Image (cartoon, grey):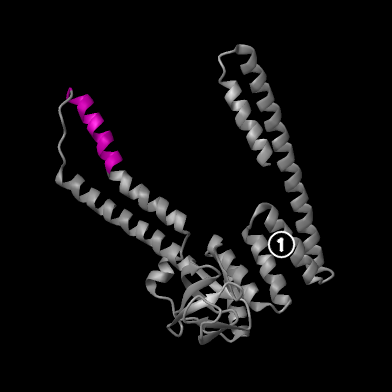
Amino acid sequence: MERAHLIHRKIMKISFSTHPLKSVTALLLLAILSFFNAMSQEVSDIDNHLKFREANDLFGETQDYQSALETYLSIENNRGLSPNLAFNIASCYYNLDELGKSRLYIEKVLLIDPQNPDAQNNLRVLLEKLNLEEPEESLLDALAKKTSSDLWLWIGFSLVVLPFAVRFITNLLKAFRRGGSKPQWTTGLASSSAVFLLLGASFIYLSHYNAKLSHCGIVIVEQASLRQSPFEQSEPTASITEGRKIQILQKHDNYFLCIDKTSAIRGWISRENLAPVIE
């Protein structure tokens, strides 16, 4: 794939040549390369679709959860994660009694699709089986999770830009109608612009807050030790049980600095024991 990109860049350089024959040849080569890239992508999509059906059969008909899991994970490596794929991986881990990893993929589903009812229901079942009680969400947490960080950012940016776009268009119309006279800010326009700017800034803050909440990890071993510092010889200060969701503050080598909001415990935890929801 990388080689194809290099060839593509070389052809693009030739296509801007001043020599007509070279330019036409380059454009023809570019069209052929694009065709074969599209065909390759289509074959890959078909292969992943067949693998997905195969994994579904392994999960549902033969209940070979390990083989189904391996097939689902190979699809993830090939094309990335979708809500359906993440949900199925979580179900495999659940049936294999790897509950921490099951929660990890449920959280990935909710990151992509926060309002997914099946994922929300399975999370409740999973927490009950793990005997975990999550801290009650604040109003700000619940609001930030209503949609994705990217969507909050898009809405906020749009609201910030809107007043300036409206004023620009208004100025053009007034200038056209009045023969170029310069319009002034009115009290109403200034007030409405201030409201839009405030709302836009609030949504941008929600985007930042949502991203901060998403920067978390799930304990994937039965008991994980929190240490005073990010070194193997450091003394453990506490232990956290499997399936617990904890906030990641920073990373150092193979350790994460985390805080468990439930017990307000802070410390370093090995990557072998904690899997980030967002890699």
Residue for point 48% across, 66% down: 215
Q: Residue 253: image x %, image y %?
A: 53, 67
Q: Nearer the viewer, residue 263 or 42?
A: 263
* Quarter of the image with the C terminus in it: bottom right
Q: Residue 137: image x %, image y %?
A: 43, 76
**Can residue 113 be seen in this snapshot?**
no
Q: Is residue 154 magenta?
A: no
**Extreme top residue here?**
20
Which residue is disc 1 drawn over?
73
Please rate how many residues cluster around mark 1, counting C-alpha atoms within 10 Å: few if below 14, some from 14 to 19, many from 20.
some
Task: Using residue 277 as the reference point, say whether residue 258 is left or right of it.
Answer: left
Magenta stretch in the rendered image: 164-179
Q: Kindly report the secondary structure that dominates the magenta region of the rendered protein.
A: helix
Residue for point 63% across, 58% down: 81
Q: Residue 173: image x %, image y %?
A: 25, 30
Identify the amino acid type marked 1.
Leu
Residue for point 66% across, 70% down: 90
Q: Nearer the viewer, residue 209 or 6?
A: 6
Judge whether 245 appears above or below 114 on screen: below
